[in-house]
Image: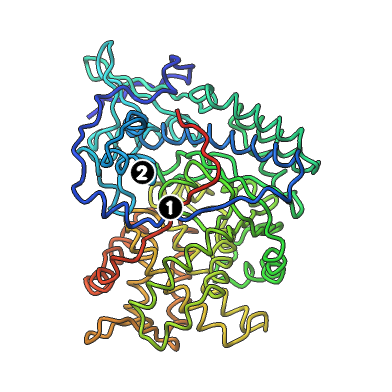
């Protein structure tokens, strides 16, 4: 275990910080079922038709894609630097097995299988809980650079409590240990560690701004370029929410904390280049109008109700013409609710984005075929693309609902910080369940027809079967298996032991959903990490009956593997 010494003030690192860690090359022990793993992801072409765009617009899109390609270079260094080295080394290989391995490395953004609880499919070393966010330097030069060992984790967590630079979302933490075991901390800002990529990324965004015909979008691009070089995303996040029905938009920032299994606070870079789907965007207006009403209706104590939450809730249905970073590797999000900064939520709210082309692929290639195998035949027709879209919209709305901060003995605390590694799964589960709960209010107030209620329940359950197939080691799957087990305990879903098929008890769903939503909202408001850990331990295991039912659907893809028209180089 590391012996902690007094933390050092953050300082600039050697120039090698941005490069992949220099640990020994990974062993080429490859999972024997690699081909079967790759087959779980169906290649889907995400075509981009540029014929309707002006020459300036086409050039602007190219600049945005170039920037997103550079962002992917950073993400790999955060996720699995050694995996990046292996991926690049296989580029020119003509061996079919090498190319298969290369494809699966790209799907996962590294050597750790996101649908098998992050177990390695290359080599035998487990994924470091802190991934590339935490480096451990042992002894004198030449240093051996490793991820933190399990025995080091309590020390790192202790250091994070006393040194805010360690828990800063935008730092790479290097812990140097002497021969005598003393530890010295160096927290390197992202803007320094990844400058090699951030400078040309910012240049691309500024050049794209110069090509834009939308002054507000151009202003946002310039502000986001500045944010990349300062690690201060607050002004550009506010400008992003000010965009009014933009034809083009981007997600471009280190937002999510899914990779950080150590502190649960380090953010990984993600990007999406998007074009507005006008027809579908117009359908969202009815949901957007009721966001404040839904917030007021939730079962929250008065002291946990944010004063301005949901003040602004822009929604967009977009087609993603390119994605990178944590929006490309692993779980293929069909929607998002951003930014995550509670200061932005308090001041302006958040933006809900729905990727229509990704949602269509998921429904057609995964959810509907799976429902036909797992659900009782007479309930299968209730699982629809419309029902999935409605629930996904409500899920993303619900990320912006609920308490803004946690009540802890230390006072008002950011929920993400209070929950640590448990935050991602808890927040995804809260959005899932509160989204389903909102259907009750919408039906009661005539916004949604009563007959659609069961359709949304069934579509949510169909999406649940898809998510838990993805694996329960990832935040979405971990949250969803907990929800499933709780609903089963309440009798809202049950398995026919004779057929192995599942049946939704629609009469029991409203009460079961309401009680679970109240519990999860209270967990976030209380900020009690131990309570959350106990809850997920109680409800977090895969039931044998569900595992058996899903095993009969092994030929159905788990998710899609997008193939874009753009292929910027990775280095």
Quarter occupied by residue 477: bottom left
Measuring from the top left, give residue 233's x and y in whole percent. 62, 37
SS for dot 1 = strand
Measuring from the top left, give residue 52's x and y in whole percent. 73, 51
Left or right of 275 in this view: 438: left
Q: Which residue is mark 2?
A: 103
Left or right of 412 in this view: 508: left
Is residue 188 shown above or below 362?
A: above
Measuring from the top left, give residue 120's x and y in whole percent. 25, 43
SS for dot 2 = helix
The quarter of the picture where the N terminus appears is top left
- Identify the residue shown where x is 71% and y is 57%: 312
Q: How many marks?
A: 2
Q: Which residue is mark 1?
A: 561
- Identify the residue shown where x is 67% and y is 33%: 205
Quarter occupied by residue 144: top left
């Amino acid at each position: 275990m590391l012996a902690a010494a007094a933390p050092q003030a953050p300082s600039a690192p050697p120039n090698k910080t941005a490069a992949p860690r220099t640990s020994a090359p990974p062993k080429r022990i490859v999972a024997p079922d690699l081909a079967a793993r790759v087959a779980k992801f169906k290649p889907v072409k995400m075509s981009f038709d540029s014929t309707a765009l002006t020459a300036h617009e086409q050039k602007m899109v190219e600049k945005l894609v170039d920037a997103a390609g550079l962002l992917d270079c950073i993400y790999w260094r955060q996720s699995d630097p050694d995996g990046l080295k292996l991926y690049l080394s296989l580029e020119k290989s003509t061996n079919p097995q090498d190319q298969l391995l290369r494809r699966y490395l790209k799907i996962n953004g590294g050597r750790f299988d996101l649908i098998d609880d992050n177990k390695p499919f290359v080599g035998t070393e487990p994924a470091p809980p802190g991934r590339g966010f935490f480096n451990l330097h042992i002894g004198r030069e030449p240093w051996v650079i490793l991820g933190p060992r399990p025995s080091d984790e309590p020390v790192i967590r202790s250091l994070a409590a006393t040194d805010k630079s360690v828990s800063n979302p935008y730092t790479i933490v290097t812990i140097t240990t002497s021969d005598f075991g003393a530890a010295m901390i160096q927290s390197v800002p992202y803007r320094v560690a990844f400058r090699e990529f951030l400078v040309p990324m910012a240049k691309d965004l500024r050049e794209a701004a110069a090509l834009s015909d939308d002054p507000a979008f151009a202003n946002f691009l310039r502000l986001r370029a500045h944010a990349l070089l300062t690690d201060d995303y607050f002004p550009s996040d506010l400008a992003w929410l000010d965009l009014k029905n933009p034809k083009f938009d981007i997600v471009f920032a280190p937002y999510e904390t899914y990779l950080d299994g150590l502190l649960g606070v380090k953010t990984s870079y993600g990007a999406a280049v998007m074009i507005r789907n006008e027809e579908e965007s117009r359908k969202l207006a009815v949901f957007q109008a009721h966001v404040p009403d839904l917030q007021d209706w939730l079962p929250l104590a008065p002291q946990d109700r944010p004063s301005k939450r949901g003040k602004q809730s822009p929604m967009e249905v977009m087609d993603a013409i390119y994605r990178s970073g944590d929006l490309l590797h692993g779980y293929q999000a069909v929607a998002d609710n951003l930014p995550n900064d509670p200061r932005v939520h308090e001041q302006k709210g958040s933006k809900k984005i729905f990727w229509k082309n990704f949602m269509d692929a998921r429904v057609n290639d995964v959810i509907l075929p799976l429902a036909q195998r797992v659900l009782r035949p007479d309930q299968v027709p209730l699982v629809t693309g419309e029902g999935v879209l409605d629930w996904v919209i409500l899920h993303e709305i619900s990320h912006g609902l609920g308490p803004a901060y946690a009540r802890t003995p230390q006072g008002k605390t950011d929920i993400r910080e209070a929950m640590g590694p448990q935050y991602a799964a808890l927040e995804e589960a809260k959005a899932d369940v509160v989204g389903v709960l909102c259907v009750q209010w919408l039906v009661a107030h005539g916004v949604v027809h009563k007959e659609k209620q069961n359709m949304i329940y069934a579509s949510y359950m169909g999406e649940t079967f898809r998510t838990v197939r993805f694996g329960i080691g990832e935040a979405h799957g971990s949250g969803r298996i907990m929800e499933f087990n709780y609903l089963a305990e309440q009798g809202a879903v049950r398995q026919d032991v004779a057929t192995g098929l599942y049946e939704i008890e629609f009469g029991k769903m409203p009460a079961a959903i309401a009680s679970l939503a109240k519990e999860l909202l209270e967990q976030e408001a209380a900020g009690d990490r131990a309570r959350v850990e106990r809850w997920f331990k109680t409800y977090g295991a895969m039931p044998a009956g569900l595992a058996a039912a899903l095993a009969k659907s092994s030929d159905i893809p788990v998710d899609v593997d997008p193939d874009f028209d753009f292929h910027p180089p990775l280095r």
